[in-house]
Image (tube, grey):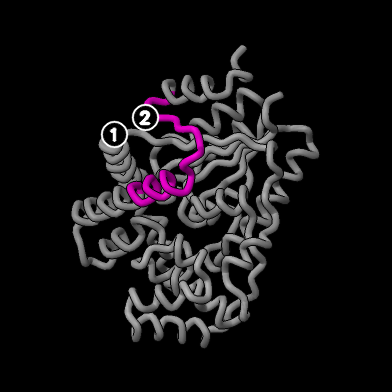
C-alpha cells in the first residue's frame, strides 16, 4: 500500500513545488508547506510561494497564513503541520509535505523536544562566554556536560554551540537529554521521503533566472510594502534571502542591476547551504537528480513503483 504521507525536500529552485503538485494531482493529495519563509503572507514572489493558479489545483496548507510580525518557531510549525496532517487524514486523503527547511523535516520525522523557553540573560551570558573562551575552548567545555551535542556540532557553529550550552545552563539538563524525549514525530512506516539534488550549475542558473523574473513581476512592490511596516529586523521573514538587497535599491543605495546581482549571489549561496545540509542530515533519503520536471517525475515514480499504472 502506498504511504499516506510523502515528504519532498530540496534546495530553493530545485523543482520541489512542481513535483509536489504533480504528485498531489496524481494521487488526490493535499499539500503542506515545510518552508519557513513561505509560511508568511507578505512576500509571495520573493519567497517563491506557489501561485494562486497552482494553489487552486490542489488544497494547500500553511502557505501565506502567517503575518510577518508573528515570528514562528520550528515547534510552532510542527504543531500546525500535525494539525494539518490530521485533518487531511480525517478526510481520507494522502498528504505531500514539501519545502526547503531542513529543520522542519527533522522535527517532523524525529520529533522535537519541548525545551522550556530560555531567558534572555542566559542567552546573553552564553554568547559572552563563547566570545571570552573562543570556539575551541567553548566546544571543549560543552563536551564535558553534553558530549553527544559536542560530537555532532562543529566547533565553528557558534549558534548551535551556544544553544546547547544555554539549555544546560537554564535547565540543568543537557540538550541531548531533552532531545531524547522528543515528541510529535511521524510514526515509522507512515511516510516516504525524497530529496531533490540537481546539478549545482543547473540549480544556480535557475536561481538566477527566477530572481530576474521576480524583478520583472513586481517583487520591488512587495519588498517596499514590507519594509514600510518597520518591523523588528530579527523577525524571521525580515531575513528572507534577497530582501536586504532589494530594499537597498529602494533606499537608493544600489542600482537595480546591482541589487539583482547581489540577490542572485545570496540565493545561490542559500541553495548551496541547503544542499549541503540535506546531504549531511538527510543522507538516508532517496535522491532525485536532474533539473527537468519530467525527468524528476520519472525518477520519483521509479522510487515509488506503487504509483505507476
Secondary structure under tag 2 reads loop
Q: Can residue 231 be seen in this view?
A: no
Determine the image quadrant of residue 238. bottom left
Report crowding for label 2: few under 14, some 14 to 19, many 20 or more residues within 10 A (C-alpha): many
Q: Is residue 69 magenta?
A: no
Q: Which residue is drawn at 36% across and 51% down?
A: 273
Q: Mark 1 points at which residue?
A: 202
Identify which residue, 200 or 179, lies in the foreground: 179
Identify which residue, 22 or 149, lies in the foreground: 149
Q: Residue at x 52, y 78 (%)?
A: 166
Secondary structure under tag 1 reads helix
Q: Is residue 291 visible?
A: yes
Side of 196 relative to 65 (left or right): left
Choose the circle earlier in sequence order: 2 or 1. 1
Residue 67: x %, y % from top left: 56, 62
Residue 37: x %, y % from top left: 48, 55
Q: Name the residue under label 2.
A: 291
Q: In which quarter of the image is the C terminus?
A: top right
- The segment highlighted magenta reads 271-293
In the rendered structure, are the residues bearing label 2 and label 1 in contact, judged by CB atoms less than 8 Å apart? yes
Residue 233: x %, y % from top left: 42, 72
Side of 19 relative to 90 (left or right): left
Amino acid at each position: 500500500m502506498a504511504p499516506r504521507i510523502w515528504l519532498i525536500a530540496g534546495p530553493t529552485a530545485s523543482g520541489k513545488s512542481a513535483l509536489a503538485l504533480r504528485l498531489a494531482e496524481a494521487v488526490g493529495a493535499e499539500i503542506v508547506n515545510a518552508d519557513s519563509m513561505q509560511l508568511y503572507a507578505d512576500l509571495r514572489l520573493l519567497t517563491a510561494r506557489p501561485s494562486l493558479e497552482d494553489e487552486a489545483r490542489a488544497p494547500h496548507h500553511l502557505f501565506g497564513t502567517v503575518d510577518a510580525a508573528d515570528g514562528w518557531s520550528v515547534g510552532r510549525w510542527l504543531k500546525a503541520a500535525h494539525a494539518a496532517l490530521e485533518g487531511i487524514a480525517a478526510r481520507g486523503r494522502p498528504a505531500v509535505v514539501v519545502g526547503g527547511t531542513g529543520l522542519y523535516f527533522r522535527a517532523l520525522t524525529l520529533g522535537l523536544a519541548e525545551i522550556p523557553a530560555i531567558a534572555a540573560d542566559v542567552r546573553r551570558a552564553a554568547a559572552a562566554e563563547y566570545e571570552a573562551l573562543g570556539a575551541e575552548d567553548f566546544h571543549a567545555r560543552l563536551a564535558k556536560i553534553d558530549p553527544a551535542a559536542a560530537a555532532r556540532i562543529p566547533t565553528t557553529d557558534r549558534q548551535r554551540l551556544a544553544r546547547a550550552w544555554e539549555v544546560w545552563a537554564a535547565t540543568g539538563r543537557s540538550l541531548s537529554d531533552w532531545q531524547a524525549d522528543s515528541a510529535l514525530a511521524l510514526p515509522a512506516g507512515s511516510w516516504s521521503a525524497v530529496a531533490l539534488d540537481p546539478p549545482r550549475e543547473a540549480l544556480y542558473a535557475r536561481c538566477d533566472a527566477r530572481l530576474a523574473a521576480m524583478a520583472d513581476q513586481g517583487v520591488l512592490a512587495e519588498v517596499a510594502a514590507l519594509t514600510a511596516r518597520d518591523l523588528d529586523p530579527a523577525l524571521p521573514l525580515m531575513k528572507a534571502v534577497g530582501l536586504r538587497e532589494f530594499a537597498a535599491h529602494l533606499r537608493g543605495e544600489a542600482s537595480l542591476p546591482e541589487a539583482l546581482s547581489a540577490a542572485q549571489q545570496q540565493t545561490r549561496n542559500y541553495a548551496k547551504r541547503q544542499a549541503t545540509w540535506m546531504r549531511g542530515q538527510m543522507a538516508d533519503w532517496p535522491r532525485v537528480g536532474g533539473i527537468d520536471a519530467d525527468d524528476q517525475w520519472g525518477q520519483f515514480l521509479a522510487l515509488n513503483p506503487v504509483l505507476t499504472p
